[in-house]
Amino acid sequence: MLLDRASTLSTRIGTHQKLKNSAAQAEQFGTRAKQFETASLLMASLRETLIALTEAGVQVAFKPTDGFGYAEKARTLRDAIKEDPAKVNDPPFDIKHAFTDRLNGIASAGQTAASVAWKTYVDNRAAFGADDVLSALSQVPQFRASVARVRQIRSEVATLGASLPSDPKAAIARLGTLISQHDAAWNALAASDIPPTVVSFIRDAANGEALLSAYTSEVQTWIESRNLVGVFRIKLR
């Protein structure tokens, strides 16, 4: 009877140990699966972003470091696991530090490069000039409505360029619309009691295109009479 009990206890202990080992292995498999899933999702998202931007005409200066080397690691790991699934817990290289962490880093760097490329694209297309002249124009009652509109449009453009769009082509179309609206608002910066030469000079100055020859006595008189001399600067080309 005692021997039977001992045998039963030994069997239970053995079963318990096997279950513990199986649970530990399952936990390791789960950890690996999560590591692979995170890296896979990040890389897939980066790929989609780069393709969408390129198709929309936005070039991203990004080349992953040793991309072919990590692709070879992936093939090596895939072949090892195919031959023996347990290899996922005894891989031929450090999966976390030498593989998934590096892939996550590449994905992060790629997204940063894409964000910079998008903002640069928006800034280059929407080179509206300095805002300080707008502050001067806002002091003139006839210009206030147009100035407010210009500022609103510039704010919308800045917001558009601040983050990567989910649909770059649609965002570029929206950018084109905003630029057209901005041009229209600039053209509205005119009033019957303000000389056309003054309107033209201020508009050109805001875009950095005003010539010294355009600073006529009429323009000078109008600007000085409204204490706006201090907002203008002479700059060589």
Image (cartoon, rainbow, N blue to C red):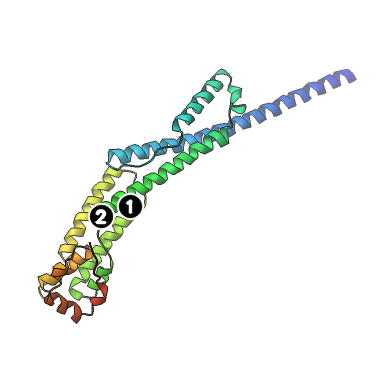
Mark seen at residue 5? none
User: Alpha-carbon distance for marks 2 and 1?
Assistant: 10 Å
Q: Say how many tags the image has.
A: 2
Examine the rendered structure and indicate whether residue 17 appears above or below residue 153: above
Where, quadrant-wise, is the N terminus in this rendering? top right
Q: Amino acid at mark 1?
A: Gly
Tell me the amino acid under the disc marked 2: Ala
Inspect this view and state whether residue 2 appears. yes
Q: Compared with residue 193, is residue 170 higher up or lower down, i.e. above or below?
A: above
Per the image, the residue denoted by label 1 is: 161
The residue carrying pointer 1 sits among few (fewer than 14), some (14 to 19) or many (20 or more) residues within 10 Å by Cα, namely many
Toward the viewer: 18 or 177?
Answer: 177
Q: Is residue 43 left or right of residue 203?
A: right
Of pointers 2 and 1, the one earlier in the residue sequence: 2
Label 2: few (<14), some (14–19) or many (≥20) C-alpha neighbours in 10 Å: some
Q: Which label is found at residue 126?
A: 2
Q: Residue at x 29, y 57 (%)?
A: 156
